Image: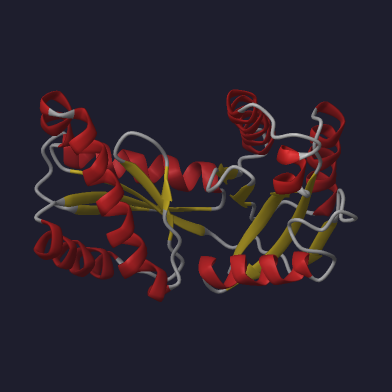
Amino acid sequence: MIQLTLIQIDNYGPWTTHPLPKREAYLQMLQAEIYQTIQRMFSEKKALVFPMRYDNMMAITNGLGEPEHKLIMDAINKKFPVSISMSIAAAETPYEAQAKATKQLSTVGGAQHKHRKAILKASGASNSPIKIAHVDINDITKHTDSNVYDSYARVVQIERSLVKHFTPKGSLVFFMGGDNFLLPCGKTTKHDFLKIFKKIKKETSIALKAGIGTAKTAEEAVHLASMGLKEIRSGAKEEVIEKK
């Protein structure tokens, strides 16, 4: 079981345009500051936040209960000119968990519902170990050094391919900057990764590698995954290394 928390800015779309459209630079800075603050507060509890669209974020929060969530939510809502709501759910796969969390929050008002503010909903919890993969693209630097925009386009292309192949297996895909992706992956196995990487290389001519980590907290799972990836970068003759 994996526990996932949906974090959603309340009524954000209408707020950005009322009474007049707000400056884009201001909105980008506000989103970045909200994400930074939420990431810092959850990381202090060994959880990890994925930025997604910034007005919507997801966190892997196994082991954290409603009181810890409420403390973070209240702190954010006091600091910023917009409020956030949270929805906690647990399921067998990350994809199922986010679907439950999304539906649960929508029962008290959608993302642009003007009367929904600072809601915390929860159904189910989990202390089970978490599996997260750290995926990156082989030899992206040589493309960056020759044509930086083309290298960015390759990253976007790979993100689409990862979503296409991993979502049906119940995994989630998050771009984390550079050529790095983090995949909360539930029951997806090392064999699944190798098989999918082979398909993606055939479709795109782009090769991938990954470390997979399993641990009690999201922070430790990602650390183990990154250690596996480091071994591959250092010359290990494997495309995928799994650590527990």
Residue 214 versus residue 15: which sits nearer the camera? 15
Horizontal side of residue 143 vs 103, given as left or right = left
Residue 211: x and y in percent read 30, 49
Q: Quadrant of residue 98?
A: bottom right
Q: Residue at x 87, y 30 (%)?
A: 78
Q: Residue at x 59, y 42 (%)?
A: 54
Residue 80: x and y in percent read 79, 29
Horizontal side of residue 53 vs 185, given as left or right = right
**Residue lying farthest to the front in this orientation:** 20
Residue 38: x and y in percent read 67, 36
Horizontal side of residue 105 vs 191, given as left or right = right
Q: Is residue 15 above or below residue 145?
A: below
Q: Residue at x 87, y 50 (%)?
A: 117
Q: Residue at x 20, y 64 (%)?
A: 194
Q: What colour scheme was applied to this rendering of the protein?
A: secondary structure
Residue 12 versus residue 65: which sits nearer the camera? 12
Q: Quadrant of residue 146?
A: top left
